[in-house]
Amino acid sequence: DLKNRLDTLTGNLMDILAELKLIDARSGKDSVRGKMKAGLYHFDNSRKLTGCCAKLDWALQEFQVMSKVDSCLKDLERHEDLKNEIGESRDDVKKEIKESRDELRDGQQELRQEIQDVRKHILNSDRDKEIEKTSSNLPSTTMPACPKIFGRQQYIATALTLILTNTSVHLAILGPGGMGKTSVALCIVHDDQVVSRFGKNIIWIPCEQATSVNLLVDLLGKGILPTSSSSGDRLGEIISMLKGSKELFILLLDNFETPWDIPGQQSEVADILALFASIPTVSFIITMRAGQPPANGTVEWTNPRLPPLPPLQMEPANEAFLRIAPEAAGDSEVNTLLRALDCVPLAVTLMARLAEAGEQPSELLTQWRSERTKLLDQPEGDRRNSIEVSIKLSLDSRLMRSNPDAVALLSVIAVLPAGASLSRIDEICPSIPKWKTALRILRTTALAYESADKTFIQLLSPIRSYILLHHPLPPASLSDLREAYFRLAEKGQSEPGDASFVEDSKELDAEKVNIETILLDSLTTASAGDTSNSRIISVAYDYSNYLYWSLPQTTILEAAITLARASRSRLLPFCLLLLGKMLYSQGIIERALSTFSEAKSEFLQAGNDWRARQCGRGVGQCLRSTNRLDEAYSVLMEERTESLKLGDSINANSCSLSLGAVLTEQGKHEEAESLLEEARAGFIEEKDDHNAYECLLFLSRVYMDTKRYDKAQSTLEQVRERQLRVGNPIGALYCQVELGEVLLQKR
């Protein structure tokens, strides 16, 4: 019975083979008629292949018969009463068992071979169809024309020097999508000197469709060796031809990231590159979306290596834009628009086409800020005419798909206009513990790059805009990021003279753009009833204090005041007082006056007379600055008297300082000098170094007015040295200006 069953299986396998031969005959590879038949029989062929697979499954199940038979035979051996039932001797039974086993093993081997043959036939048949289909659609390897490019002359000259001074070169033109790598490479190989050196052996291989090693080899064959023998070893034929030729060849492998990204076949692709690199007469250039060349270690890349292509400088970017949209010449917003695009060539080109269609640069700038990369997207676009498609190709690479943390890190960096500080990533990305691996992938894929000083990791504007639009930071991660920058902004509490002021200021200077972006977003998106508002306003106040001592800017503080009013925050008068001081330092006196007055009123309502007196002093200073000296003197004397009643010697001394300034301008130099010396002594006693030097600054003016120029000069030099020491460059600059005036008067 077992033998009959095996015969049946063999017959079924023969039927399967017959079916496959029929399908193969219907495919009609070499005739139009045959191809028409193949189309007609498509569904029938599919049904028959499905039936063949079902029969194969049955055959595989039958293979399990052997193990069951072996088990039965072992059972037979263990039962002695079997000999009586069959009426034969024990030896005869063993002999029959052995013969059955041998027969079944032979049948099993034959059956296994038949199944392997059927499988191989099916796989080869499918592969032949895929290769036939894909090979017929391989892109043309005809060299494209030389494009018109801008601002890449030095880069091209460097590449040409390498090509023309070496027997063979291996060059990699790298960078993110949209940087113009293909255009640069084409300009190199179209150069007259390269054409003279290589002649007809300049071969362009567009690798964008090389999604398997076989297709890569087919593309190489189509470009290098269009006719081949029937050996089946296409790559071997190519290499043999190149090795046997005495002519020089240069290959341009464009968009090489596609074959390099084939899952599980990177080593095979590297081996192909290494084969070309081993031939002394063969040079090659690859273009690739990457930050470093592939097969590093397997291929010896020519030194010095070409750096990744950077964005264009402003002048060539402007030239490229106006070549497409000449009517925009003279528009002052063009450069602003190009700067917003980071001068990325593809983005510049696409934006120029919109301008060519009639859009004004100012309108395009507004649209870019709201629509981001969607503005430069085109229906059914490809990497050459859609910035979104170009960026998405990089995001869909194997490396990026293999590590979700890489996209998560991109989302964090995109929120920060200046990029992420490499020393602060641990703090701002607590949810990405393996950020170093993610960062390495971003560098490798050229989606991110390091700043010139190697301290920040940054994104080009189009990539940043795409990520903000399509991969926004999740709320939990945004909260972590904000908290990290809030802690940093709180370092703005320190003031000149504090031990940490200089170091704190350096940290805040480095992250200024990022801090202000985070704070403005937090202040403008908060709702009036949020419990976190007090924290946000407090942080904004601390950071604005840093701005007051460095380069006064009121944007953050005014946004904090708006939120404080809406939230009825107790911090409102404090913010108003600081705003008044900032406006005063900027020379916006009338607005400073009204702000000090409002702050004073708010403090009095809150019962904080001490702070109200400080605001009153601010009012007096504003009156002095608008030359209302009598009013100023009256206000300051009142505030000084009230401060002394409150026991507030610090504000009383500050009022004395301001009164000294008023008296100086009134020409009452003796009274002014006495009051300023008194105030200075009080500040020294209070260990208020800053205001003590402020007194010296006003005393220098008294000395100048009374023609004591040497004393004025020495006093100003003393104050200037102190301002530099505590990290107050604005104050030092003011002293320098005053010193210049002293020297002029001394003449």
Image: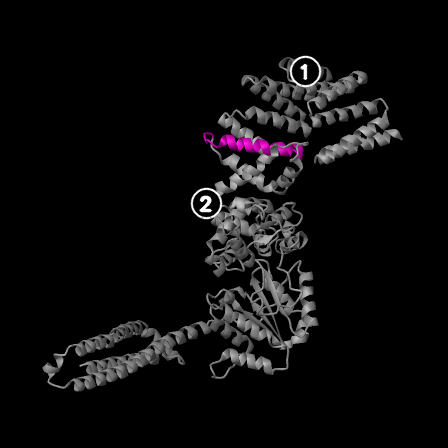
Residue lying at 59% horizontally and 83% vertically, measured from the top left: 244
Circle 2 or circle 1, nearest the eye: 1
Q: Determine which of the numbered discs, if any, sits on residue 640 in the image.
A: 1
Q: Determine which of the numbered discs, if any, sits on residue 663 in the image.
A: none
Asked if residue 93 can be seen in this view, the reply is yes
Q: Nearer the viewer, residue 70 or 631?
A: 70
Please say if 411 is above or below 575: below
| Residue 602 lies in the magenta stretch | no
- Give the residue type that dot 2 points to: Pro
Reading the chain from its start, which is encountered first: label 2 or label 1?
A: 2
Q: Is residue 92 left or right of residue 36?
A: left
Q: Nearer the viewer, residue 92 or 713?
A: 92
Q: Position of residue 557 (x, y in %)?
A: 58, 31
Q: Determine which of the numbered discs, if any, sits on residue 474 in the image.
A: 2
Looking at the image, which residue sits at the far right? 747
The image quarter in which residue 201 lies: bottom right
Q: Position of residue 589 (x, y in %)?
A: 67, 25
- Badge 2: residue crowd in 10 Å (few <14, some 14–19, many ≥20): few
Residue lying at 47% horizontally and 49% vertically, measured from the top left: 471
Quarter of the image with the N terminus is bottom left
Please give the range of residues in magenta. 528-554
Q: Is residue 22 left or right of residue 501?
A: left
- Badge 1: residue crowd in 10 Å (few <14, some 14–19, many ≥20): many
